[in-house]
Amino acid sequence: MSSNRLPSPCHRLYSVWFRHVLVYTRNLVSNGLPPFMDPLIFLAGVGLGLGRYIVSMDNLPYIQFLGSGLLVTSSMYTSAFECTYGTFIRLEFDKVYEGMLSAPITTSDLIVGEILWAGTKGLFFSFAVCVVFAVFGVIPLSASVLAPFVGFLTGLMFGALSLLITSFVNTINHFSFYFTGVLSPMFFFSGVIFPVSNLPKLLQPVAWILPLSHPVAIARALTVGHLSPLLLLNLLYIISLTVITGYFAVRRLRKRLVQ
Amino acid sequence: MADPVLIVENLHKSYGPIKAVDNVSFSVPQASCFGFLGPNGAGKSTLMRILYGTAERERRPETAVRVFGFDPAQNELDIKFLSGVVPQDNNLDEELNVERNLLVYSKFYGMKRREADGRIDELLSFFELSEKRKARIRELSGGMKRRLTIARALLHAPRLLILDEPTTGLDPQVRHLIWDKLRQLKKDGMTILLTTHYMDEAYQICDTILIMDKGRKAMEGPPQDLLDSHIERYVLEIVKPDAGREIASMPVPEGVRSDPSRDRLVFYSNEAHVLRRIAKNLGHGEYHLRESNLEDLFLKLTGRALNELQ
């Protein structure tokens, strides 16, 4: 008989997270390199082409404006992929969750662990973008220290939201609606490409409903160094949406895992 | 005798209009092997899942479920910590190799790395998988995957092992290997609970079997006792239909029962010589005289074969 005691909730979350780290680090090159390649390609594209036509945006060099937005969009996409396609495969095809539930792990441990992992990937992806941008002087070094933390929050938020979406999906193809219908428009209208203030007056409040607008606002403020107390509202939005969607994701996915 | 490891009283579970488990009660003493025998869809898996909390039972006042004194509806984690579960599907982590599949589970059980490493070595060699340590899951044969899934359930040295159809779809050699290992574990004090639709599996390793049919308990007891008290000792099967036609037209001798529901002519009796007399005009290979088994018992009880779908 093992002398161990029943693992604590923290340990259980850690062990779910550990499983994902183990899987991710197995292919370190193919998983670890692309996050650094993406911003390089962006720099080449904007630096060599687009940057000649659009020099500045909202009183910022355009490369810096766009770059500060991209700090968090990479986090959004990676956590959304992880918690839609990744989760669905673990849930329906590989039955990984079913196996995990035969160990002392609850369904909430599983789902919250999944959200934490999405946050971790968000952190890593925005860190990769930061490193590249800081090396090329696109964003100041001071900003790049804090930006991965915004990437972490972005990952948590889109992880939780995507898990909630996944709980409604029965066929893996349906995720394309989420990506082309929700995430792509968000990429264009959340202040990444152009400021929200350039939108028609009527549409501006709509843009602030979109989840991505809030981490973008924080990331840009960090880049510019204009920290205002209003950013706390953005932070509050991110935390609230994460908690609410996370709560319903746990409830709905539990129904799929427990008969 | 010590308290039973497992007590189930008046358990019910429905999926919509279908009753998967219909008023089943039983208890399992320590260091014994208890088997659920029944065709696919008899409610065996559902019953197992209820025990470790991945299916919810119907809430009724007369129902009680206790595993090591814990109720799965409240203390699912305590039960899972003391038990090892081998689900019907192997559900191994395809994205990790053999060794790491076990390493991840050692974390789930809160084991220290050094303890886990030692235990992984031990189990891989116990299940003859040491050479496959670094192999990917998709490189393993069906039998290897099954052994690895059982090894995974034993990682934390549980006191109860729950196996849902441990050898379905495996070749005879692997089945015997798994049976040997299970017998060895039982000798070391492990309590084993398993489901099966193979009568030889139930007969060979279970101390007690519970025959399930359409969610209900049809019969319970030690396999040999059930055979002794519910079915004749010998069975004569007429293999060739032509040969059977003539015999079918003759009156059935005293002390012999024939079963018209089966797809071939079958006679049962406690006396082998009476059956031999029926077959006296038949040539070699035209009949089969043997001892009765659980399959015959199940058929007598339910009118259906064990491997039929319900």
Image (cartoon, coloured by chain):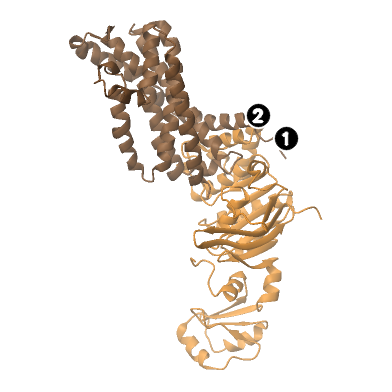
Is residue A123 visible to the viewer in this orientation of the structure?
no
At horizontal 60% and vertical 66% (from top left) the residue drawn is: B216
- Residue A142 vertical placement versus B303 (above, below): above
Query: Which chain is displayed in orange in the rendered image?
Result: B
Q: Quadrant of residue B117?
A: top right
- Residue B21 vertical placement versus B154 (above, below): below
Q: CA distance from mark 1 to mark 2?
A: 13 Å
Q: Is residue B154 left or right of residue A50?
A: right
Residue A3's disc number: 1
At horizontal 51% and vertical 89% (from top left) the residue drawn is: B248
Q: Quadrant of residue B131?
A: top right
Q: Nearer the viewer, residue B15 or B153?
A: B15
The crowding category of the residue bearing disc 1, from other C-alpha atoms within 10 Å (few below 14, some 14 to 19, many at least 20), is: few
At horizontal 46% and vertical 83% (from top left) the residue drawn is: B241
Q: Colour of chain A?
A: brown
Which kind of residue does numbered mark 2 sit on? Arg
Q: Nearer the viewer, residue A61 or B133?
A: A61
Is residue B137 visible to the viewer in this orientation of the structure?
yes
**Percent position (x, y) of residue A123?**
44, 20
Q: Chain of mark 2?
A: B
Which kind of residue does numbered mark 1 sit on? Ser
Determine which residue is flagged by label 2.
Answer: B114
**Percent position (x, y) of residue A250?**
50, 38
The crowding category of the residue bearing disc 2, from other C-alpha atoms within 10 Å (few below 14, some 14 to 19, many at least 20), is: few
**In the rendered view of the protein, which quadrant contains the N terminus of chain B?**
bottom right
**Percent position (x, y) of residue B150?**
59, 47
Q: Is residue A193 left or right of residue A247?
A: left
| Label 2: element kind | helix
- Residue B259 vertical placement versus A49 (above, below): below
Q: Name, please, the residue furthest toward the front.
A: A202
Q: Chain of mark 1?
A: A
